[in-house]
């Protein structure tokens, strides 16, 4: 019985360790958002391929949503050639850092 | 000549009105399809952080995103278990109206460096 408890505790610890593996760090983002700001840093910037529309405002969006969106572009669940190329070049840590950065961005005063 | 000019002006105005979508119709659609149930009553406080804030988002982007969900797994589409179902009943005009309404709401989204 003790052994089972010990195992459960260990498993719990492992879970925490796995979840804690990747934590977004907004301070690490500035070197990683060079690819983003060319479109998302310009108010009203329009993407022209494959459709013409203003790229979304991502500043102030939650980190979890940004992370999910980037992973969907990466996987191809969101089919957008430009964003697929960019997302595919990012590691999970990069995505977490970029997501943290943009989630903390506030409207320009 | 004057008549032709008037006709041109009128058609330009009506085209703009069509392209921009109807805010009130969009509001009614969000109620009909319960968009707020996930995205939040004010559309800037979604019930889960994995859902986007929509209030104030660029109108043509929202239009693009909804159209992409409608395409589903096809080219330029988006695969999403929830949204693919939500957009099924929407017409192109519905999508424009929704985008106009969501864009008109005050939000905290921003685009700057």
Image (spheres, coloured by chain):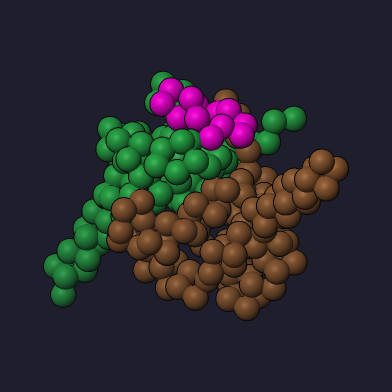
Chain colours: A green, B brown
Quadrant of the rendering where the N terminus of chain B is positioned: top right
Most extreme residue toward the front is: B1
In the foreground, B69 or B91 = B91
Q: Is residue B74 magenta?
A: no
Residue B69, horizontal then vertical, whole percent:
42, 61
Q: Is residue B22 left or right of residue B89?
A: right
Q: How many marks?
A: 0
Name the residue at 22% across, 60% down.
A11
Determine which quarter of the picture holds residue A90.
top left
Residue A30, horizontal then vertical, whole percent:
46, 23
Most extreme residue toward the bottom is: B32
In this picture, is A105 found above or below B99? above
Quadrant of the rendering where the C terminus of chain B is positioned: top right
In the foreground, A99 or B4 = B4
The magenta stretch is A34-46
Determine which quarter of the picture holds residue A105.
top right
Name the residue at 42% across, 64% down.
B70
Residue B74, horizontal then vertical, whole percent:
30, 58
Q: Is residue B9 left or right of residue A30?
A: right
In the foreground, A70 or A21 = A70
Q: Is residue A44 magenta?
A: yes
In this picture, is B80 found above or below B32? above
Q: Is residue B6 visible?
A: no
Q: Is residue B97 visible?
A: yes
Name the residue at 16% across, 70% down.
A4
Name the residue at 14% across, 67% down.
A3
């Amino acid at each position: 019985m003790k052994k089972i408890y010990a195992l459960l505790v260990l498993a719990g610890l492992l879970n925490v360790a796995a979840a804690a593996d990747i934590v977004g760090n907004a301070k690490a983002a500035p070197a990683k958002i060079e690819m983003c700001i060319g479109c998302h840093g310009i108010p009203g910037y329009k993407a022209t391929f494959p459709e013409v529309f203003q790229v979304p405002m991502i500043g102030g969006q939650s980190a979890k949503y940004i992370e999910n969106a980037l992973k969907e572009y990466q996987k191809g669940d969101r089919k957008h050639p430009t964003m697929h190329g960019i997302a595919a070049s990012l590691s999970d840590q990069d995505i977490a850092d970029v997501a943290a950065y943009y989630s903390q961005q506030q409207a320009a005063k | 000549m004057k008549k032709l000019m008037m006709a041109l002006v009128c058609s330009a105005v009506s085209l703009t009105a069509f392209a921009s979508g109807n805010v009130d119709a969009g509001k009614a659609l969000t109620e009909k399809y319960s968009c707020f149930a996930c995205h939040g009553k004010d559309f800037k406080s979604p019930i889960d952080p994995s859902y986007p804030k929509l209030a104030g988002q660029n109108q043509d982007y929202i239009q693009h995103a909804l159209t992409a969900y409608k395409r589903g797994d096809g080219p330029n589409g988006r695969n999403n278990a929830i949204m693919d179902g939500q957009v099924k009943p929407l017409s192109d005009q519905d999508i424009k109206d929704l985008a106009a309404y969501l864009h008109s709401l005050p939000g905290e989204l921003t685009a700057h460096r």
